[in-house]
Amino acid sequence: MLGQSVDDQTRCIHYHSELDVIAIRFACCGEYYPCHLCHTESAGHEVRTWPVAERDALAVLCGVCSSELTIVDYLDVDACPYCAAPFNPGCRLHAHLYFAPE
């Protein structure tokens, strides 16, 4: 995982609450970053969002158990389906930065 992480559960300097435990694999580069700000600061290229047609891609990493979720699965849950770690509900406000809206 790239970016400015602060622990081994994908928290970063921008988002580091107890619930901030996911990283996103960016469509533009295929790399995992803890957040859009980490990508902007580190990647050196513009963000490309995941198109709706690719919602079955493994693009979300649970920082607690290291399981990968598809975009559609991630958008449909409030916690990791593998380890039950709760996800930050505020992340839904940023979904358009990672995934093209339907």
Image (cartoon, rainbow, N blue to C red):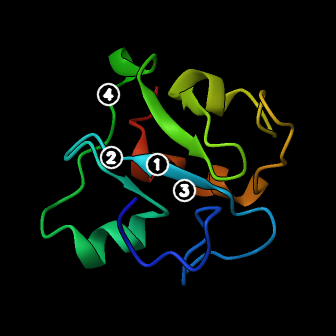
| Marker disc for residue 10 | none
Q: Along the polypeptide, which appears first: circle 1 or circle 4?
A: 1
Disc 3 versus disc 1: distance between alpha carbons? Answer: 11 Å
Q: Where is residue 38 in the image (x, y as percent from the top left)?
A: 38, 72
Q: Quadrant of residue 65?
A: top right
Query: Which residue bears the numbered disc 2?
Result: 26
Query: Which residue bears the numbered disc 3?
Result: 94
Q: Position of residue 73 (x, y in %)?
A: 63, 23
Q: Nearer the viewer, mark 3 or mark 2?
A: 2
Disc 1 versus disc 2: distance between alpha carbons? Answer: 6 Å
The amino acid marked with disc number 4 is Pro
In the image: residue 82, left or right of residue 6: right
In the image: residue 23, left or right of residue 31: right
Disc 1 versus disc 4: distance between alpha carbons? Answer: 14 Å
| Marker disc for residue 51 | 4
Query: Which residue bears the numbered disc 1?
Result: 24
Q: Along the polypeptide, which appears first: circle 4 or circle 2?
A: 2
The amino acid marked with disc number 2 is Phe
